[in-house]
Image: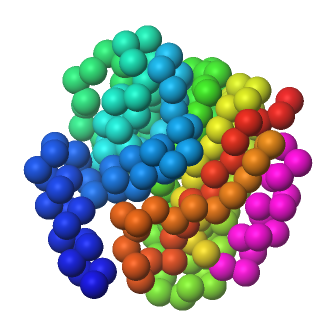
Amino acid sequence: MSYIMHDHYFKKAKDEGYRARSAYKLKMIQEKLHLVHAKDRILDLGAAPGSWMQVVLEYIGPQGSVVGIDLETIEPLHDPRAEVMIGDVCDATIQDMIVSCGPYQVVVSDMAPKTTGSKITDQARSLALVEQVFHLADRCLNKNGSVCAKIFEGQDVQAFVKSISHSYAKVALFKPKASRGESFETYIIAQKKKL
């Protein structure tokens, strides 16, 4: 079943001009939760190959913009609303640069650690990345802004959700249908950042 799903979204992405099947994950999140709006400035962490940036560009209108950053090169999107950076979002200097390009109305992250095959290790590394996402959001996200970040399911996820719930009006987990069935990824959606 998941192999068929993979083929479906992979083929659909190719047919519709998206750089990766992951575009449909963000589209499903957007359809359900309406995180991105016209005129928003969006920060996309772990943006390569650029499919989430492509989706964001569909929603932000002519006055919105998106900044994408990744360790890997992101091929230009040939859109003046899109800016790409190469760098490690966990590096303090890069974080300062990201903050200086803000503020942002939404931070999205489809980052995942290099997997080891150990679910416990991979989940811990995923949580460490998500902690960096929310640390950055604390510094550069506008009041009432939202965060959408991939995390690997595990025993520490609920404790992390609880730890950030005081900073946002609503925090929930959501797994889009475009995620592979066997995948243990889900997304933390934190909406309406408090001051």
Q: Is residue 128 left or right of residue 42?
A: right
In the foreground, 128 or 187: 187
The stretch drawn in magenta includes residue 74: no
Vertical order, 123 against 120 (above or below): above
Q: Viewed as shown, does residue 154 lie left or right of 15?
A: right
Above or below for 61 versus 176:
above
Examine the rendering and report whether any part of residue 45 can be seen.
Answer: no
Q: Please identify the quarter of the rendering in which residue 180 is found.
A: bottom left
In the image, residue 4 lies at what x, y percent?
21, 78
Considering every residue shown, the one lying at the far top of the view is 63
User: Which region of the structure is painted magenta?
Assistant: 154-167
**Label tally:** 0
User: Which is more toward the observer, 156 or 132?
Assistant: 156
Classified by dominant secondary structure, the portion drawn in magenta counts as helix
Asked if residue 155 lies in the magenta stretch, the reply is yes
Seen in the image, is 161 located left or right of residue 17? right
Does residue 27 lie above or below 81 as drawn? below
Who's the residue at 73% across and 53% down the image? Answer: 171
